[in-house]
């Protein structure tokens, strides 16, 4: 007897249309393809946030192009604000970094559920694989997440479907269960073999696109949250440069190379001061939170410390502070290790 025939219960047909959580990585492409190949229409739902690698670069072309290649409508949704609140106080706790994965996943499924309602879709598809991630992809945790998101029975995970309870889409015959997979664990060989069979190429290497799992980034973010500085502008600045805490309200960010110097210039706010060595090559620095004389001199000395004039007795530093006339400070470069106690470790 086939697996479908063993399934009791649901006979009412559901629409052959689903919302697919779509990162654009290999797993979500495969999951989408397994369902599309059964004649189901999919809406690719791609989540963005300030915590994702590449955020702010203006590039969503990878997932968007992948969705187009597969023939899916593409929608993107920004979760930055809700995710920032979850990072501060996640009901289910953090992972190894500041990643609130369980609550983030619940949030994503709630969003997908809402989109189902708007678009007349009948179920949700994800590229999750049982046992691939310790926090969210254990079988018991998947059940718990579905329950918390109020989507029990609605989430089809085609890559591991044969290891999981049949979902509504399978019970109604909208999706044929026997054409789904039983992948589990962290090894990606089965997925790569399936990609080969389905002719899916050019997928990105698994890179872990979420910075919240990175220990160094998480330490910096925690320091920021401890100082109640969780605005998007402050969080965006975290990815760039060396960070110094000059006082509880004041932060200095010093570029480590030309690319970071450019990023720092792009992040400057009217209330910030921008500093650069004027007579020598050196970093661009950004002072935020208190542009007073004392902080400017301290910031100029640290900026000079990382420039080519660091061994001079005095160095000139150009200062541009929100609408004021540009001026120059002559300062003694900070000595080796002088402000190390203010450096935020990453
Ligand atoms: S890794 Fe980041 S984006 Fe992914 S579930 Fe965890 S918190 Fe959310």
Image (cartoon, grey):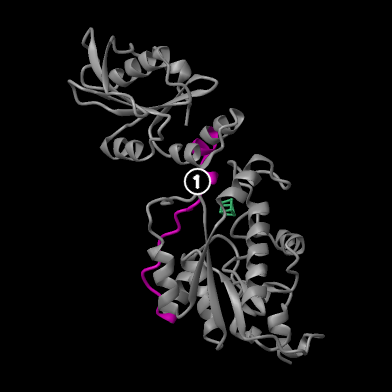
Q: From the viewer's side, name the closer residue of 206 and 329.
A: 329
Q: From the viewer's side, name the closer residue of 195 and 92.
A: 92
Horizontally, is 259 left or right of 287 in the view?
A: left
Q: Residue furthest right?
A: 9
Residue 190 visible in image: no
Q: Quadrant of residue 62?
A: bottom left
Instruction: Give percent across and percent down for residue 242.
Output: 40, 29
- The boundaries of the magenta stretch are 198-219
- Of helix, strand and loop, which one carries label 1? helix
Vertical comparison of 297 with 76: above or below: above
Assign the N terminus to one quadrant of the image: bottom right
Q: Exactly how many numbered labels are in the figure?
A: 1
Vertical comparison of 27 with 252: above or below: below
Horizontally, is 318 left or right of 179 in the view?
A: left
Q: Residue furthest left?
A: 279
Residue in the picture at 39% in, 71% down:
65
Horizontally, is 271 left or right of 324 in the view?
A: right
Residue in the picture at 39% in, 39% down:
267
Vertical comparison of 60 with 236: above or below: below
Decide: few, some or many residues near mark 1? Use Cα within 10 Å; few <14, some 14-19, many ≥20: some
Instruction: Give percent across and percent down for residue 68.
Output: 42, 76
Is 2 contained in the magenta span? no
Residue in the picture at 40% in, 77% down:
69
Q: From the viewer's side, name the closer residue of 111 and 158.
A: 111
Residue at the spot of label 1: 211
Residue in the picture at 55% in, 78% down:
42
């Amino acid at each position: 007897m086939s697996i479908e025939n063993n399934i009791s219960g649901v006979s009412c047909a559901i629409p052959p249309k689903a919302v697919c959580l779509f990162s654009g990585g290999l797993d979500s492409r495969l999951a989408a393809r397994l369902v599309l190949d059964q004649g189901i229409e999919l809406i690719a739902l791609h989540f963005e946030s300030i915590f994702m690698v590449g955020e702010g670069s203006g590039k969503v072309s990878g997932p968007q192009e992948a969705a187009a290649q597969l023939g899916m409508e593409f929608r993107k949704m920004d979760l930055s604000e809700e995710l920032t609140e979850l990072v501060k106080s996640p009901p289910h706790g953090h992972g190894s970094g500041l990643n609130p994965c369980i609550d983030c996943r619940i949030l994503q499924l709630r969003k997908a559920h809402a989109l189902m309602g708007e678009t007349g879709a009948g179920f949700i598809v994800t590229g999750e694989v049982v046992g691939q991630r310790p926090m969210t992809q254990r079988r018991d945790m998947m059940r718990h997440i579905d329950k918390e998101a109020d989507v029990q029975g609605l989430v089809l995970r085609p890559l591991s479907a044969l290891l999981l309870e049949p979902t509504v889409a399978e019970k109604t015959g909208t999706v044929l269960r026997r054409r789904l997979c039983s992948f589990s664990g962290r090894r990606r060989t089965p997925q790569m073999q399936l990609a080969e069979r389905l002719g899916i190429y050019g997928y990105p290497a698994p890179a872990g696109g979420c910075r919240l799992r990175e220990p160094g980034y998480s330490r910096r973010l925690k320091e920021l949250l401890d100082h109640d500085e969780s605005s998007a502008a402050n969080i965006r600045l975290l990815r760039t440069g060396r960070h110094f805490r000059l006082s509880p309200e004041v932060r200095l960010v010093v570029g480590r190379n030309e690319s970071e110097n450019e990023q720092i210039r792009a992040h400057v706010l009217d209330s910030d001061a921008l500093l650069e060595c004027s007579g020598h090559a050196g970093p661009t620095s950004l002072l935020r939170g208190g542009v007073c004389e004392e902080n400017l001199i301290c910031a100029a000395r640290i900026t000079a410390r990382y420039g080519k004039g660091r061994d001079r007795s005095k160095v000139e530093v150009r200062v541009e502070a929100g609408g004021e006339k540009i001026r120059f400070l002559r300062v003694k470069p900070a000595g080796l290790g002088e402000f190390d106690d203010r450096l935020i470790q990453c």
